[in-house]
Amino acid sequence: MRIAIVGGGIAGLAAAYELEMARAAGAQVDYTLYEERARLGGSLASEIVNGAVLERGPDSFLTEKPAAAELCRELGLGGELLASNDVARKTYIVVRNRLVALPDGLMFLVPTKLIPTALTRLFGLRTKIRMGLELLHASRPSGGDESVAALVRRHFGQEAVDRLADPLLSGIYGGDAEQLSAQTVLPRLVEMETKHGSLTRGMLAAHKRMRDASKKTATEKQGGPKRTAPAIFTALRGGMSQLVDALVVRIDRASLRTGTPVSAIRKTAGGWSVEAGGTQQEFDGLIMAAPAWAAGELLGPVDAALGSELAGIPYSSSITLNLIYDEKKIGTLPDGFGFLVPAVEGRAMLACTFVHRKFLGRTPPGKAVFRAFLGGMNREAMLAESDETLVATVRREMAAILGTKTFGADVEPEHAQVSRWRRAMAQYAVGHKERMQRIAARVAELPGLRLVGNAYDGIGVPDCIWLGRQAARELVETGSKMSSAKI
Ligand SMILES: Cc1cc2nc3c(=O)[nH]c(=O)nc-3n(C[C@H](O)[C@H](O)[C@H](O)COP(=O)(O)OP(=O)(O)OC[C@H]3O[C@@H](n4cnc5c(N)ncnc54)[C@H](O)[C@@H]3O)c2cc1C
């Protein structure tokens, strides 16, 4: 079976690795991976500068989604996995240029502890009263989709949208709470509302179930080693590019065609024809691992309805900006991992991570690394600004937020690195689930086609790895059924 993979981001590479494994196990599989850039890895791109690991794209992955750490272990990178420094975890929200810590007990945007919620400076009295009354919220029959902002507003009011939902989601998706789908992005909360009415009651019930389950496990394992909760994020000591490099080593070099954009795809009687770099090749299967907007352009001529569904998935663009400082030259930073900036603050920055605090051992002693995140939905124009302007904007905003004593205008960074990510993060807009059902129905009519990447079933690195590997497994299985049927 011959398979084409279009796109050499983490989803495409994971698919290629899985095909390579199948081949090693005896499957009759041949593949070609086309990547338009000279470099593989897509959004995963790290660099080591003055001994500090700088991430241009993702800096880590969620530990609770095992696909990424599992792949790292398979590739011999188990010893390189690095847990986030959760003892120092504290996140701030910027409120009128001041940092306000997220209150204790906040779970998925839902306040579950009375005293920290009552005392926080994040919300005014009206929102706090509304949060208390939310316990009486009536249950709602499961209905159509709505935006995350609409769901949060119905339960906790506009201030909770502005100071909580918006900054938390723009920090993850570069997205807009008014557009993101509650059903896709916060399915647990939608379920809780249907069952309990109040999200706070739903969250407390879920928390109690988890506590009871872990007590039971602890009783069963009495005498065994004491278990601590795993860290929220996992990174690689040398950066996310370690994962890309380890995958590339395992993938047959002759199967990789970098610097080769796919320019056209056709459906043939027996499979797929792929045009790239002035040549045309025939395949039995096609794993489309390019962003949905690029996939839509390529697949539109094959199936117009599929092409327009794919083109309809919105994407946001973003900028990451890493600054390395000599720690002695800056003032004392507040505790914690960094801060999020709500859109209502009117700043260019959406978030800033204190990298040297979040992951220990990736920054040399005496250095501080800050990673600012800018851009998001409808802020495309920012990508056209020069590096100098972007660095100056971030330094000015950091001084305004952290104080000029910490970030004096005269303190120069030792190094500044700017990365632009145009249309790199898919947005799961209201109606995403229904769109996915329509896409699945079209794909079912096109044998041998699989769509993978961050546009479909999870935005994170582990989601993309899982989907890429799964697509490869499915095609290999179909191929082996077809060849045994021929025998
Ligand atoms: C700035 C940023 C920070 C992020 N932070 C995190 C994080 O901390 N944790 C986390 O889990 N996730 C994070 N994400 C999300 C995660 O990194 C991405 O969702 C994931 O890497 C996407 O992988 P992919 O393979 O689907 O797509 P991509 O990485 O976009 O790869 C798609 C590839 O397809 C290629 N391509 C496009 N068109 C063609 C064509 N015609 N022919 C050939 N090749 C083509 C592109 O060049 C690209 O290399 C972040 C994303 C960004 C942009």
Image (cartoon, rainbow, N blue to C red):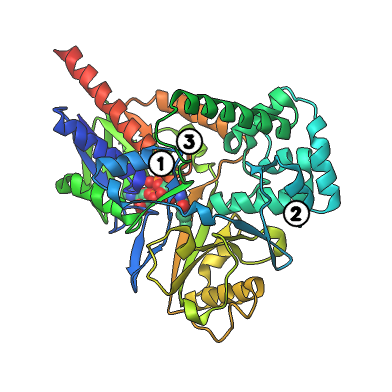
Q: Is residue 142 visible?
A: no
Q: Earlier in the sequence, mark 3 or mark 2?
A: 2
217 left or right of 123? left
Residue at the disc numbered 3: 457
The disc labelled 1 sits on which kind of residue?
Pro
Quadrant where the N terminus sits is top left
Residue at the disc numbered 2: 120
Q: Secondary structure at mark 1?
A: helix
Asked if marks 3 and 2 touch (Cβ < 8 Å), the reply is no
Q: Residue at x 61, y 51 (%)?
A: 168
The disc labelled 3 sits on which kind of residue?
Asp
Q: Is residue 137 above or below residue 129?
A: above
Residue at the disc numbered 1: 462
Which of pointers 3 and 2 indicates the residue nearer the eye?
2
CA distance for labels 3 and 2? 35 Å
Is the distance from the Cβ of mark 1 to the nearest ligand 1 atom less than 8 Å? yes
Q: Secondary structure at mark 2?
A: loop
Which of pointers 2 and 1 indicates the residue nearer the eye?
2
Q: Earlier in the sequence, mark 2 or mark 1?
A: 2
Quadrant where the C terminus sits is top left
Asked if marks 2 and 1 touch (Cβ < 8 Å), the reply is no
Give the class, few, some or many, for how many residues have Cα within 10 Å of label 2's Cα (few <14, many ≥20).
some
User: Which image quadrant for residue 403?
Assistant: bottom right
Give the class, few, some or many, for how many residues have Cα within 10 Å of label 3's Cα (few <14, many ≥20).
some
Q: Nearer the viewer, residue 334 or 108?
A: 334
Q: Is residue 47 visible?
A: yes
User: Percent position (x, y) of residue 169?
Assistant: 60, 49
Q: Residue at x 65, y 45 (%)?
A: 179
CA distance for labels 2 and 1? 34 Å
